[in-house]
Image (cartoon, rainbow, N blue to C red):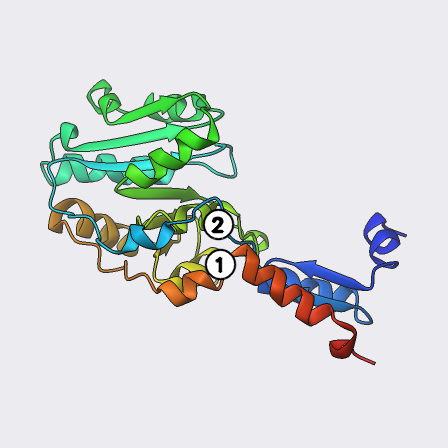
Amino acid sequence: MSLEKIFLGKADFIVTVSEPLLEKLQTRHKTKHCILIENGFDADEHPNFKNNFSKLKSINKKKVNFVYTGLLSNHRNPEVFIKYIIYFVENYYINPSQIAVDFYGSNSEIVDNILKLYDEKFREIFRTHEQIPREKILKIQRSADYLLLFESSSIKNQGNLTGKIFEYMVTGNPIIAFGTSSNHSISKTLKHTGTGVGLDNEDDNKIKQCLHEILVEQTNNFYSPNIEHILYYSISRQIKRLLEITSPSNRKA
């Protein structure tokens, strides 16, 4: 018997964070109460987050700043993003000084290894930084123009709904999630909240269209935040939902 069956066999409820994971659990544990409660953001940590949406930033600027915060790995790899940024610099005569990409967190050597494949002149675009305190990271996220996520395009990862997306969401800045097809939980959440766009790493046209909007047209038509939908993902609301669902009056016979 697997450890999953041993531990979950004793559970009254099984809680998971995305639809694909819920479907898997319902198939494996048909007699259990399986519940969907997504990750969310802590409103106490972001008490004035609504103000971040009151005045959307001007996107007609001389320099565009992309920011990624967190762990890089083979699974969360920026290779496709870097390739397309360099493509736009080369093909649309964009001066490298007009773009800044900052990576904050672990395994920055992944970025260095990718850049070895390209001309030295592109290195000024991409900057890596060591891990810094969370309070500073939150400020950096709020000051960015665009926030980046990197995920695996594998079908088995379509249910991965990282908590990072909700941390990003309340900054009032657009989110671009690479490695997420239209069926990925991250893409669906971004679409539901209007806070960004999911990009399949294999979808050349969509990636070019997105970056053309940002770098050439200086627009971001994919960004139209819905405050009510964002509030749905506050942790306080998620806890309330969990308590309602698990109350004795709502349990299945």
- On the image, the x and y values in percent for residue 251 come to 77, 76
User: Do we see residue 40 in this rendering?
Assistant: yes
Query: Does 69 sit above or below residue 235?
Result: above
- On the image, the x and y values in percent for residue 48 come to 37, 49
In terms of depth relative to the viewer, which is nearer, 147 or 126? 147
- On the image, the x and y values in percent for residue 180 come to 44, 53
Identify which residue is drawn at 69% across, 60% down: 15
* Residue with the mark numbered 1: 184
* Residue with the mark numbered 2: 153
Q: Residue furthest bottom?
A: 253
Which numbered tag is attached to residue 42?
Answer: none
The quadrant holding residue 120 is: top left
Q: Amino acid at mark 1?
A: His
Q: Amino acid at mark 2?
A: Ser
SS class of the residue under badge 1?
A: loop
Q: Local crowd at mark 2 within 10 Å, few (<14), some, or many (≥20)?
A: some
In which quadrant will I find the C terminus? bottom right
